[in-house]
Image (tube, rainbow, N blue to C red):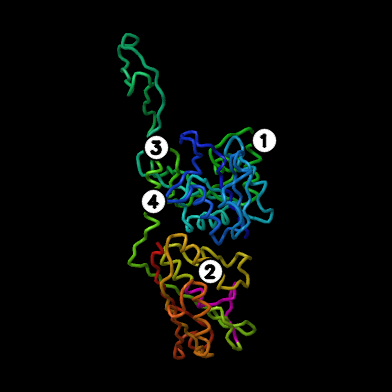
Amino acid sequence: MPVTAIIAAGGRGTRFGGGTLKQLQVVGGRAILERSVAAFVNHPAIADVVVALPREIASDPPAYLRGGSKPLRVVAGGERRQDSVANAFGAADSKSDLIVIHDAARPFASADLIARTIAAASESGAAVAALQARDTVKVGELMVRRAHHERNDAPLILSSSKDEQPWVVTQTLPRASIFLAQTPQAFRRDVLEAALDYATREGVDATDEAALAERAGHVVRLVDGEASNIKITTIDDLIVAEAIAGGRAKPARTGRAGIGYDLHRLVDGRPLILGGVAIPSERGALGHSDADVVCHAVTDAVLGAACLGDIGTHFPDHDPRWQDASSLDLLRAAVSLVHAQGLEVGNVDITVILERPKIKAHVEAMRRAVAAVLGIEPDRVSIKGKTNEGVDAVGRGEAIAAHAIALLRSNA
């Protein structure tokens, strides 16, 4: 299912102040906009990216928005956020079934959050990342100052300053049902189109597309957001953003380990691909991609070590893009996600469990192929072949399995 990402960066950040546009401010050595765009350009589920910029810079965008590994288009934004999104939607690939929208001012959305939001929208039509409220929520209303002599029994409401009208509580809401919306927000193409059409037809203003979808009668699913997925709105937010960027840039140097496992049935008429190498065999593994259990197990191990979900989250077996895909490409995309987290692969250890054929003669070629994708030397890739001594489906020659352990370390 092709997915287009829209980065809403058309605002001018009036609450932020200063002479530089908020989205061009630098956090941790990189512009806020660059960080937000990179999160989607580097994500394996995203096919193309459209960035809505203020008109004055859309004609000459920053260098990091030119070229790249995926199609990236820049459009001029509008007066309102929904106008910018509508302009970007018009430039989205017509083949995209899903559209995911993200605020440029949220530079720390994780790959896992993006994947979960897309998956929820694929199932439900629309989804929004949101954090459940932790504090008690009060509804307030402005009360005009009154003097004692007007009503002796009326309390005198004092404000914090003589120039402000006071606020009073009118209602306390149950926090268990209160969620604070974030982005990304994802929609099936028809749902987003209907929401934007509704806004135009009814003259509705909204702060996000999920609200428009709700108003247009669509159900919007909630996805657990992330506390680190902050929105930079004021200068003070930059202090928090710098702390988050610093923490991500310097992961623990002691290393992070992950475990991966994969199993596929063996059938006639399929090639047997292991570690990107075609192994002579009468039977091959059955799967949506090339069913390479070595690459699949390593991919899960690498993603697991970085806490980025699993292979099914990023490369679902119902997505036609991964039909007969090389699992080396899937592993390569997973490594890109890991690198974006400030990590690199230290070494991997893989065990292949297969009755026949024997893989010993092909191990060195497999090690070289896997190492090249991981960006490490072959002497840091271990591959061993084992049998299951005739026990269960693997032992009867009906299936093949693989286990992998990956160690990640800081690339800082």
Q: Which residue is mark 1?
A: 201
| Amino acid type, label 2 | Arg
Q: Nearer the viewer, mark 4 or mark 1?
A: 4
160 in relation to 13, above or below: above
Q: Which residue is mark 2?
A: 332
Q: Is residue 257 left or right of residue 212?
A: left
Tell me the SS state at disc 2.
Answer: helix
Q: Nearer the viewer, mark 2 or mark 1?
A: 2
Q: CA distance from mark 2 to mark 1?
A: 45 Å
Q: Nearer the viewer, mark 1 or mark 3?
A: 1
Residue that appears at 32% across and 8% down: 149
Residue 87 figure quarter: top right
Residue 152 figure quarter: top left
Q: Earlier in the sequence, mark 4 or mark 1?
A: 1
Q: Nearer the viewer, residue 189 or 217?
A: 189
Q: Report the magenta residues as a range.
A: 283-298
Q: Is residue 225 left or right of residue 321?
A: left
Q: Position of residue 185 (x, y in %)?
A: 54, 49
Q: CA distance from mark 2 to mark 4?
A: 26 Å
The label on residue 173 is 3
